[in-house]
Image: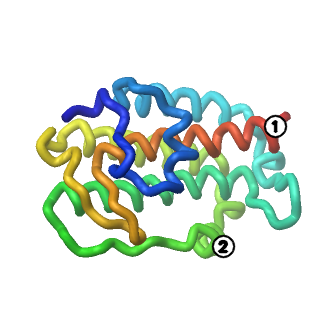
Amino acid sequence: MSLNQKPLVGEYPPYAEMYLQHVNNENILVLLQERIETVKQIYNQIDEQKANFRYAPEKWSIKEVLLHVVDTERIFAYRAISIARGDTRALMGFDQDVFVQHSYADERTLSSIVEEFELVRNSNISLFKNLNSNVLTTKGNANGYDVTPRAIAFMLAGHEIHHTKIILERYLA
């Protein structure tokens, strides 16, 4: 198995379908790398005042959305490495709204969050690039669902693309 083939049904939770629809059957490492520049291009054009914008009172700000992407990448990477390294324990889920509420993203500069995204993404690329191909389709359990490290790599890309599309369509349109 390689990271050039989209994961099969059964390798990822049903909720991940909304992320995987954004990713084709391509080399996921190349896509993850390319998306760094795309994200930087989009977010580096947003000024600090606009970065605190919410399109509705209960919605996250632009900064909160991007920091949510960063937090989720860290959590997904932990899941991937745990499964790849043979940890058979069920891995807990996380409450994204609680994470965002306690992120204090709006107290940071957008550029610091963009920089953090790039660092975390590069770290995750290194992780997936160096996983042995034998473990890519090893199933583990995260948040009550079966998932494989390969699926998680694709979920990382799709999750970021999903949220970037929301930023473009609902915040910057």
Name the residue located 58 percent from the left edge and 38 percent from the top edge: 161
Q: Which residue is mark 2?
A: 101
Name the residue located 65 percent from the left edge and 62 percent from the top edge: 105
Would residue 23 appear left or right of 82 to someone viewing this image?
right
Q: Which residue is mark 1?
A: 172
Residue, far front: 9
Q: Where on the picture, by quarter, is residue 57?
A: bottom right
Residue 115 in picture, x, y percent from top left: 52, 44
Q: Nearer the viewer, residue 11 or 128?
A: 11
Residue 173 in picture, x, y percent from top left: 85, 34
Q: Residues within 10 Å of mark 1 (few under 14, many from 20)?
A: some
Residue 164 in picture, x, y percent from top left: 65, 39
> Which numbered disc flags the more N-terminal residue, 1 or 2?
2
Q: Is residue 59 above or below residue 1?
A: below
Helix, strand or loop at label 2? It is helix
Name the residue located 75 percent from the left edge and 36 percent from the top edge: 168
Residue 67 in picture, x, y percent from top left: 58, 55
Asked which colour scheme the image uses, the reply is rainbow
